[in-house]
Image: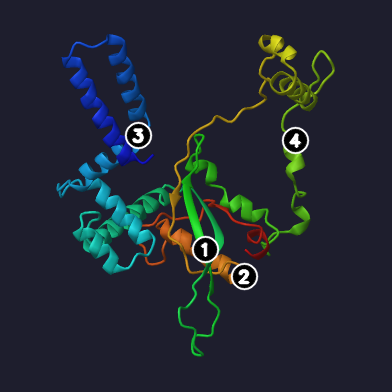
Amino acid sequence: MSANRLMMSSTSQYRQIQTLATEDVDVAALNELEEEYWAQVDELDLEGMKKVIILSILMQSSNQKSNALQSIIGIFLHSSHTPAKVVDTLSRMGLSVSLYLVQSAICSLASKSHERLTALGQTLLALYAYNNFDVDLKSYIPTVERSNESLKHLTSGLVFPLQHNITCGDLKCSKDLWAQSELNSLTNQTTLSSKRSYKDLLRLHSDTPNLQGLNSQQQFNSWKFLHNLRYHGPEYFAYFQSKLKEPKPIESIPLVKTPILAARAMYINNLTVAGNIRAVEALMGQGGFEEESEEAVELEEYVVLFHGDLGTGERL
């Protein structure tokens, strides 16, 4: 049964209830009719009706300083590459802001994002990350003159601050790293220390066995086995939940929320050595370290951390 029919039926039944209420009728019959009325009302899409009413109220808003719904729709239309004529039509219908306001909002957001990226980069406590992505720009009418490939290789980037009380002094070790680098032609290769790997990190903390003779790795495996029995095994093991304690941390890293700033996409193919270098330079430029900038902080003594893909270590 459609919503319109339900509403008409419910209205007629409501009128019958009002008529019977004014007459001397059986109370039980009146209650039964009323229950039937509310049962049909519950079948209506009340949530959908509320959404329509709320959207209608928002659409009729004429406050030029707070057209929230229209502004969101306008930015969404811009992000989905909606034609200008469609945006103009929707703005005249009250569903979106004008094309001029959409462009102004995009420029304002881009300007504020650039300011935030520059401010974070100048603290020297920013970490940069980049990766490649592909966009297929197909032509509507392929011609001989436009027979080139439509697949474009671009680079995206993220910038976020270093956490856990890291200071600029911790990153002031560029000269020491360069003195120990194999790429430094002025360094005596025979005096360089041996290479280290992730296995050396496993020996940072002493691994003293406990009373049962288990080292830290074996203790964790034992705890994980008991944890799986409790939460994924038979119900019998739920009785031992109070006896299952959390594993003892060796050196825990506190959990913090890291704000992430999206950098401007770059028309750079980082699948080559030159492309990786250009991507790093472009990201550093968005962090305020441009060649023509006179106010940029000197980076000579500091280390800048970068995250890339598998090709970064090979081609950079």
Q: For the residue carrying disc 3, how many other residues have a C-alpha within 10 Å: few (<14), some (14-19), or many (20+)?
A: some
Q: Where's residue 257, x and y in %? A: 48, 35
Residue 124 drawn at (x, y percent)? 46, 48
Q: Looking at this view, is 216 or 197 the one in front?
A: 216
Q: Residue furthest right?
A: 213
Quadrant housing residue 182: bottom right
**Front label number (1 vs 2):** 1
Question: What's the CA distance linking mark 3 and mark 2?
Answer: 61 Å
Helix, strand or loop at mark 3? loop
Residue 155: give its label: 1
- Identify the amino acid type marked 3: Leu
Q: Is residue 293 left or right of residue 150?
A: left
Figure check: 310 above or below 37:
below
Mark 1, secondary structure of its residue: strand
Which numbered disc, 3 or 4, marks the residue that appears first in the sequence? 3
Instruction: Look at the image and tell me whether residue 313 can be seen.
Output: yes
Q: Earlier in the sequence, mark 4 or mark 2?
A: 4
First-in-chain label (3 vs 2): 3
Q: What's the distance in space between the residues labelled 1 and 2, CA to CA? A: 12 Å
Q: Earlier in the sequence, mark 3 or mark 1?
A: 3
Q: Could you say which disc has been placed on residue 202 in the image? A: 4
**Residue that numbered label 2 is attached to:** 272
Pinpoint residue 278: horizontal percent, then vertical percent: 52, 67
Give the residue pinned by disc 3: 44
Query: What residue sits 39% from the left and 39% below the top?
Result: 1
Q: Percent x, y for residue 93?
A: 21, 57
Rounded to the nearest angstrom, the CA distance separating label 4 from label 1 is 35 Å
Give the residue at the far bottom of this rendering.
144
- Rounded to the nearest whole Å, what is the CA distance between mark 4 and mark 2? 34 Å
Residue placed at 32% from the left, 24% from the top?
38
Q: Earlier in the sequence, mark 4 or mark 1?
A: 1
Q: From the viewer's side, name the closer residue of 205 and 189.
A: 205
